[in-house]
Amino acid sequence: MAASSSIRIVVVGDVHDYWNFEQDSKALEFLQVLFSIILFPFSFPVNEKAYAYSAANPRDFGDENVEVVQSVANVEFSKAVILGNHDAWFTKQFSKSQEKDKVQLQLECLGEEHVAYRRSDFPLIKVSVVGGRPFSCGGKPLSQKKLLSARYGIKDMDESAKRIQKAARGTPDDHFLILLAHNGPSGLGSDLNDICGKDWEFGGNGDYGDPDLAHAISLLKENDQVSIPLVVFGHMHKELAYGNGFRKMIVVGPDNTIYLNGAIVPRVKRLNDEDKRSLDEESALSSSEAKGTRRAFTLVEISEGRVAKIAESWVSVVEDRTTLEEEHILYEVS
């Protein structure tokens, strides 16, 4: 494996309606990701109030936001996308009428950039992205069975794991492989602040990772079929429920596979707002945004075929001025 000498990948996890084409495009240009990949593990609740409610209750309110998905699709960078649970919140099966449902419309917006159960190769930078199961709610149940069966022929966790394994086989030997899923794999801890730990209920097994993704990774590592240096996902928000602090956002496995959670929610805040509240409306450029925003991204630096640095980065955008406000290093090769 020998990825291009030095590349930068930007992870945007769980957009949750906090996306503005103009401001996020400026931030991405500032971060110099022209020849890289942007990973969007999507999930969209209606607004900040819905998110605040879900933080105190073991449920969430979602919205299949076609307009935001189209806006992301319009970004002129190479990217890989996987849709999350809120992107199929209302639609339980594909429409059989002439009027298309919103899940189908989102998939059409993204086209080949939606990588569920397939591999997308980027030969110029020697990177390949393999997608996991879309619409995941986390944990043992296979969510959205009718959608998965109709579009991908998936009926259970075992089939899902084998489809991910199949997609990863044949990855070019000189490519850096990234597994991209909406939720992370099971087996990474059961405490509420673990990378996929259940933070809204107490007692019992709190491991809320996806067992099919864990099984697929295990299958791929058998007999060194494929090297997996990086697994990227979202879904499990950094800020824990009930004010219990923050989640571990990175795990380095015993075989040096790096598991990265990019779900910084909310990812947009008003600039210089004393209480650091997020924006109520992100789909339109509001007067608050005109005064400036801070926008979160997770940057992954890859050098000579290995991860060299991972950082949570907050970029301020004020009209045409873009600056790096904060950087929190999550991982760095010494």
Image (cartoon, rainbow, N blue to C red):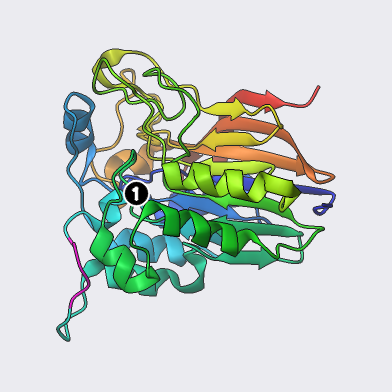
The rendered magenta stretch, by its main secondary structure, is classed as: loop
Q: Is 324 positioned to the left or the right of 73 in the image? A: right
Q: Is residue 64 visible?
A: yes
Give the percent coordinates (x, y) of residue 9.
64, 47
Give the percent coordinates (x, y) of residue 51.
23, 35
User: In the rendered structure, which segment of residues is drawn in magenta?
Assistant: 91-95
Q: Nearer the viewer, residue 219 or 273?
A: 219
Figure quadrant of residue 204 = top left
Q: Is 267 positioned to the left or the right of 200 in the image? A: right
Q: Nearer the viewer, residue 121 or 106?
A: 121
Q: Secondary structure at mark 1?
A: loop
Outermost residue toward the bottom? 98
Q: Does 94 lie within the magenta span?
A: yes
Residue that carries the numbered disc 1 in the rendered image: 136
For label 1, count other residues whose C-alpha is less than 10 Å away and answer few (under 14), some (14-19) or many (20+): many
Q: Going 29% across and 37% down the picture, which residue do you hit? A: 279
What amino acid is at disc 1?
Ser
Q: Nearer the viewer, residue 69 or 61?
A: 61
38 lies above or below 93: above
57 lies above or below 246: below
Q: Nearer the viewer, residue 92 or 102?
A: 92
- Count of labels in the image: 1
Q: Going 64% across and 29% down the picture, which residue do you hit? A: 253
Q: Going 58% across and 35% down the picture, which residue do you hit? A: 259
